Image (cartoon, grey):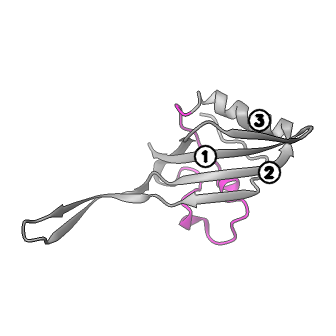
Amino acid sequence: MTHFPRHPVPTGRIYKAGDYSHGTYRAMSGAEVRILFGNKRLASTVQLIYKNIPDKDAEDLLDHYNSVKGTFESFEAGGATLNAGWTATTGALNTTVKVTDTEWRYAQPPQLQSVYIGFSSVTVDLVAVTI
């Protein structure tokens, strides 16, 4: 099992909490019934933004993407990485290691932009998967 790199620390994060699995059914009368199918949020996403980092750190992120075969394999991502910069409790983000059997996988390939000789900006999109 590989782990998402702890360094560099992201300079920004966009987090979407995901939702609980449920079904909605409407009767002929128009009454609505909602049934909850589980007690875990599904498909939480986090976008990690790394601005102006050394190319070696950018390479580490790309190497990790290659090591998990792109978007195919899931991996553990330490809370210190995903929560960097967040000052409230981490439970709200549901991003700590192995929260209720949650791992992460890449939602799409990382995006890299060269900004200056030896420095790049990288954006990584991850999606939570329940194992």
Residue shown at the point (18%, 67%) measured from the top left: 33
Q: Is residue 30 magenta?
A: no
How far, Cα to Cα, is label 1 from label 3? 15 Å
| Percent coordinates x, y for residue 105 in the rendering | 55, 40
Structural crowding at the residue carrying mark 2, measured as other residues with C-alpha within 10 Å and reported as few (<14), some (14–19) or many (≥20): some
Q: Is residue 125 visible?
A: yes
How far, Cα to Cα, is label 1 from label 2? 14 Å
Closer to us: 63 or 75: 63
How far, Cα to Cα, is label 3 from label 2? 15 Å
Q: Looking at the picture, which amino acid does disc 1 mark?
A: Asp
37 horizontally vs 45: left or right: left
Discs 1/3, front:
1
| Percent coordinates x, y for residue 122 in the rendering | 74, 44
Structural crowding at the residue carrying mark 3, measured as other residues with C-alpha within 10 Å and reported as few (<14), some (14–19) or many (≥20): some
- Name the dominant secondary structure of the magenta segment: loop
Q: Earlier in the sequence, mark 1 or mark 2?
A: 2
Structural crowding at the residue carrying mark 1, measured as other residues with C-alpha within 10 Å and reported as few (<14), some (14–19) or many (≥20): many
Q: Earlier in the sequence, mark 3 or mark 2?
A: 2
Residue shown at the point (66%, 39%) measured from the top left: 110
Q: Looking at the picture, which amino acid does disc 3 mark?
A: Asp
Residue shown at the point (14%, 72%) measured from the top left: 31
Kindly identify which residue carries mark 3. 60
Above or below: residue 33 compared with residue 49: below
Kindly identify which residue carries mark 1. 125
| Percent coordinates x, y for residue 87 in the rendering | 69, 70
Q: Looking at the picture, which amino acid does disc 2 mark?
A: Lys
Q: Earlier in the sequence, mark 1 or mark 3?
A: 3
Give the residues in magenta. 71-98
* Cβ atoms under marks 1 and 3 closer than 8 Å: no
Q: Which mark is residue 51?
A: 2
Q: Is residue 38 visible?
A: no
Q: Quadrant of residue 22?
A: bottom left
